[in-house]
Image (cartoon, rainbow, N blue to C red):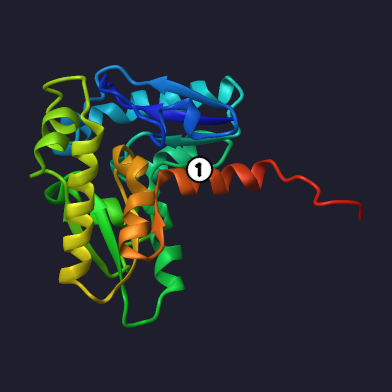
Amino acid sequence: MIGVICLDTSFTKIPGHIRNPATFDFPVRYEVVSGATAERVVTRPDPELLGPFVAAARSLVASGARAVTSGCGFLALHQRELADAVDVPVFASSLVQLPLVHRMLRRDQRVGLLVARKGSLTPRHLSGVGAGHVPVRVVGMEDQPEFREVVLEARRDELDASRLGREVLARASRLVSENPDIGALVIECTDLAPYSHLVQQKLRMPVFDIVTLTEMVHRTLAHRPYGPP
């Protein structure tokens, strides 16, 4: 079972989102941290939330989680503290994939990074996951109406999935068209993972997100025999 530390949000979580159980073919357990809104985690990070995040990780492990992740890539800021708090692997953000992705590419290529809010991504977030040295090209979703109104500002709970999908494709496409040295894309925001397949089909390059990472970690914990030895 994989445990997920969740933000305190109520908008629709469609298939492909880490908080939709249908996304995975293995058990996932969720722990919502009260008061952990996008405002307090992404827009204006509140250090007072670290304690509740640690408590959530410990609660998930006590409930049987064999690894812990989160529903927000900006928890990269707390990767070290969360990993130190429990005795199971913790991958607090999809951004922990950045060093791996970088090593897969040519030396003259960069990693594209699609984030919830570009201005909120700091060197501390990147260094928190060992990616301070990774050359990235970053674009944010903060100026996209559907994403801003529903995810960042929590004005309403009903998500227009098609509209958000168009916004994601537009931002990812512009990032790559303006930066032809991008060799792969990492999606920071868990709310955008449901559209990774569309992005990959359009850009025709590897796309990494929190779901690809969660599936990989789960496989490391649930190996199966391939046949008789």
Q: Nearer the viewer, residue 118 or 40?
A: 118
Place of residue 20 in the rendered image (x, y in percent of width and height, measured from the top left): 42, 27
Quarter of the image with the C terminus in it: bottom right
Q: Left of 74 or right of it: where is 31?
A: right
Q: Position of residue 104 (x, y in %)?
A: 46, 72
Residue 18, placed above or below residue 97? above
Q: Where's residue 179, x and y in %?
A: 19, 72
**Which residue lies under the disc numbered 1?**
214
Q: Is residue 167 above or below residue 67?
A: below
Name the image quarter holding the N terminus. Answer: top right
Q: Could one spot residue 44 in this view of the protein? A: no
Residue type pointed to by label 1: Thr
What residue is at 46 percent from the left and 64 percent from the top? 100
Q: Is residue 166 visible?
A: yes
Image point 44% across, 72% down: which residue?
103
Label 1 element class:
helix
Q: Position of residue 34 (x, y in %)?
A: 30, 17
